[in-house]
């Protein structure tokens, strides 16, 4: 079993839809949770960073962490074609030793 | 600020050949990382430097991979000899520190194809 599981998709939605992306994990010691966005042939860029459980909102993006269920989510409101990318969840026990999910491919159709 | 620079962008070699990748991190970033991203997978940490010292190389295949960060700035990752399964994108990242809440900034990677 992988430490971090993420549905690879692809997930295809119409423009303006609310998108929900999810990861599950097995290591209960993870306490730092991140979402990265990766465009084709580019490096990942950090979108959201959350420590421990709870919600964090930044513009159209909301990150949720439920440590009791070992489940994290990223919601994108009013999705745009420019949001089309691969979304990677990542987490760590301490420091910057990140364990990444495999990534979910998102396609937003105009 | 200038981002993380990597070169070359693409490299095609035959198995058993050697190859080297170069990374220049963001100025002032003490911590440098090399990740391997195989197609359809998330990045996997190969090695982490703090200044010019190695912090973590537990997932680096040391029989064929080596990395150095001379003078605590630029870094080079080498593979010798390459195997087919080394085909991947090699990502370099840097952060101000190696502790929590110091975000990683990634370069655009070097895409290696081993034939």
Image (cartoon, coloured by chain):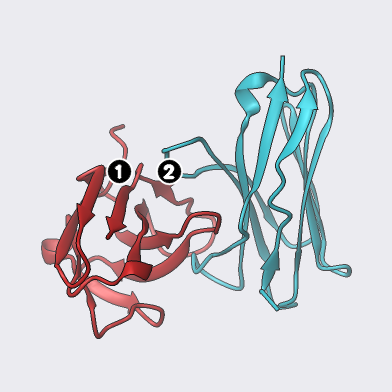
Can you tell which quarter of the image residue B34 is in?
A: bottom left
Q: According to the colouring, which chain is red? A: B
The residue pinned by badge 2 equals: A43
The residue pinned by badge 1 equals: B4
Furthest toward the left, the residue is: B71
In the rendered structure, the answer to whether residue B103 lies left or right of residue A99 reads: left
Q: Quadrant of the C terminus of chain A?
A: top right
Residue in view at x 45 percent, y 51 percent: B104
Mark 1 residue element: loop
Can you tell which quarter of the image residue A59 is in?
A: top right
In the image, residue A57 lies at what x, y percent?
76, 37
Q: Is residue B71 above or below residue B3?
A: below
In the image, residue B21 lies at what x, y percent?
20, 56
Compare residues B39 and A85 and report the one nearer the observer: B39
Q: Is residue B27 visible?
A: no
Q: Quadrant of the N terminus of chain A?
A: bottom right
Furthest toward the right, the residue is: A68
Residue in view at x 33 percent, y 68 percent: B84
Q: According to the colouring, which chain is cyan? A: A
In the image, residue B102 lies at what x, y percent?
48, 54
């Amino acid at each position: 079993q992988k430490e971090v599981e993420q549905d690879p998709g692809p997930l295809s939605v119409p423009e303006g839809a609310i998108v929900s992306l999810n990861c599950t994990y097995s290591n209960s010691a993870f306490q730092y949770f991140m979402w990265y966005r990766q465009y084709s042939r580019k490096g990942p860029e950090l979108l959201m960073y959350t420590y421990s459980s709870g919600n964090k909102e930044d513009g159209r993006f909301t990150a949720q962490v439920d440590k009791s269920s070992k489940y994290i989510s990223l919601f994108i409101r009013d999705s745009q074609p420019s949001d089309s990318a691969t979304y990677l969840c990542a987490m760590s026990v301490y420091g910057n030793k990140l364990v990444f999910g495999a990534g979910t491919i998102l396609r937003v159709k105009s | 600020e200038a981002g993380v620079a990597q070169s070359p962008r693409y490299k095609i070699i035959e198995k058993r050949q050697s190859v080297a990748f170069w990374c220049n991190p963001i100025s002032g970033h003490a911590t440098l990382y090399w990740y391997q991203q195989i197609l359809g997978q998330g990045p996997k940490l190969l090695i982490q430097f703090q200044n010019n010292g190695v912090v973590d190389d537990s997932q680096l295949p040391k029989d064929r991979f080596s990395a150095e960060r001379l003078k605590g700035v630029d870094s080079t990752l080498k593979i010798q000899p390459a195997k087919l399964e080394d085909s991947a994108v090699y990502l370099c990242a840097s952060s101000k520190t190696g502790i929590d809440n110091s975000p990683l900034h990634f370069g655009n990677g070097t895409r290696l194809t081993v034939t």
